[in-house]
Amino acid sequence: MSLPGHYETPHFPALYWPIGVLPGEPQYLYTVQDAWRFTLFWTLIVFELCHLAASSYALLVQWRNWKVMLGVVPLYSVLAGVEALMAGSVVGLLLGAVYKAGDFRMSTWLPFIWAIINVLVLILSSFSVQGGL
């Protein structure tokens, strides 16, 4: 599928209500750069929110040691940015490449969904799993 003649990259976040959509209302991504950018932005937002929740919980639990805890929120924020940059870039480029190879258009919801999947993988990988076969 080549780019439509009237194609403009949608403004971020460009989400639409998917039920009962009127013609022309849905917005799609056609290029690898757009898929990468949207996935990276959504991953940054979701990772920052997740790390903000974790650092807030750490502050609540360790409030007596407030001098040490002053660095927790900025440290978690920087770590979230680095993790999101790596995860969002890899997933965004893979998504864009797969959709371009299949000659498909990508809904603007997919980068958001993959950002949620990224943070769920991050949370699940933080637990050590004992046992096995």
Image (spheres, rainbow, N blue to C red):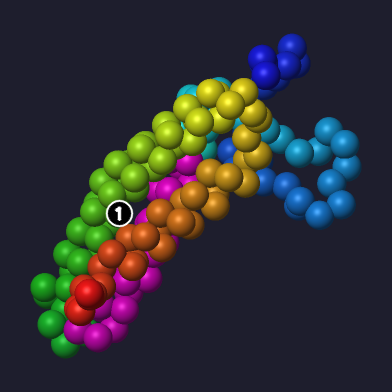
Relative image position of residue 94 (x, y in whole percent)? 43, 34
The front one of 98 and 26 is: 98
Residue 48: x percent and y percent?
38, 57
Q: Which residue is mark 1?
A: 80
Q: In the rendered view, does 93 fall on the left or right side of 63?
A: right
Instruction: Please check the rendered image and state whether residue 45 is part of the magenta-colored stretch, yes or no.
Output: yes
Q: Residue at x 56, y 30 (%)?
A: 99
Quick one: quadrant of the N terminus?
top right
Q: Badge 1: few (under 14), some or many (20 or more) residues near its Cα, within 10 Å?
A: many
- Point 76% across, 52% down: residue: 17
Instruction: Please provide percent x and percent y for residue 32.
Output: 50, 25
Quarter-of-image position of residue 2: top right
The quarter holding residue 30 reads: top right
Please determine whether, in this image, residue 13 is positioned above or below residue 97. Answer: below
What residue lies at 13% left-to-right and 82% top-to-bottom? 65
Quadrant of the snapshot with the C terminus: bottom left
Q: Is residue 29 magenta?
A: no
Which segment did they paint magenta? 39-62
Q: At 48% from the left edge and 57% from the top edge, which residue is drawn? A: 116
Q: Residue furthest front?
A: 133
Total numbered circles: 1
Rendering quarter of residue 53? bottom left
Residue 74 in sight: no
Q: Give the residue type that dot 1 points to.
A: Ala
Mainly helix, strand or loop, the magenta region? helix
Q: Label 1's element?
A: helix
On screen, residue 33 above or below 21 = above
